[in-house]
Image (tube, rainbow, N blue to C red):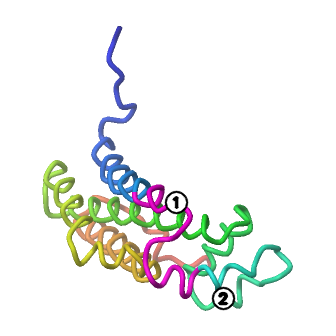
Amino acid sequence: MKPLKFPLPKYRKAFYAFIIPFLLRAIIEIYSAPYTVGYDTVAEYVPTIGGFTSIFNYVIFEISSLYNGIAMSLQFVLQNPILTVKVLAILLVGFLGLTLYLWGTTFLSRKNALFFSLIASFYFSTLRITWDLHRNLLGLSLMFATIYVIESIHNNKLRLPFLFSWPF
């Protein structure tokens, strides 16, 4: 019997950078089963998205932030505000690990970038943000993704001319 191989070896470390923080946060969220982790999750996120169970109850374009738009879209599917916040927290921590890895590859080897992303994901100040500041976590992840894209374009590793062109 042959051992299982990862289908795309080039992206194996990126997958690990996403899945390890994802699974650890999932374990924490499962352990705290009926409740959410953090203060802002209970005080702001759950009440904000709790009343939006129908597509007719809200308009996404009137929402104040990207996080609320994503949360309310997921709430429309899941129909449970606590489950929505838990799923979003798990996905955001995985996304942070992935973007930290991608940004780390611009100045480190892939192996060292994986260690960097795991250490940075579980550093105490980063953990403080991941517990309940989900909007800040999304912004931080998008910042690292943007820095990675800019660095990759600058180093000619990534060519995305369509990002800077207008359709007219």
Residue 163 point in image, percent of width and height: 47, 72
Question: What amino acid is at disc 1?
Answer: Ala
Question: Whole-Å distance between the Cαs marked 2 and 1?
Answer: 29 Å
User: Residue 33: which numbered mark, if any?
Assistant: 1
Question: Which residue is pictured at 35% across the width and 54% down the height?
Answer: 24
Residues packed near mark 1 inside 10 Å, few (<14), some (14 to 19) or many (20 plus): few
Q: How crowded is mark 2: few (under 14 residues within 10 Å), some or many (20 or more)?
A: few
Q: Residue 151 carries which label?
A: none
Q: What stretch is highlighted in magenta?
A: 28-45
- Left or right: residue 152 versus residue 48 is left
Identify the image quadrant of the C terminus.
bottom right
* Residue 148, position as x, y percentages in the image: 30, 68
Q: Quadrant of residue 72?
A: bottom right
Q: In the figure, residue 124 lies in which quadrant?
A: bottom left
In this view, 16 is above or below 72: above
Query: In front: mark 2 or mark 1?
Result: 1
**In which quadrant of the rendered view does residue 43 lie?**
bottom right
The residue that appears at 21% across and 53% down in the rendered structure is 114
Judging depth in this view, the residue of 126 and 111 nearest the camera is 126
For mark 2, what is the residue? 63
Along the polypeptide, which appears first: circle 2 or circle 1?
1
* 136 part of magenta stretch: no
Q: In the image, is 11 to the left or to the right of 59?
A: left
Q: Measured from the top left, where is residue 7 in percent x and y?
A: 40, 31
Residue 131 x, y percent position in the rendering: 38, 74
Residue depicted at 30% across the width and 53% down the height? 17
Observer-nearest residue: 50 or 60? 50
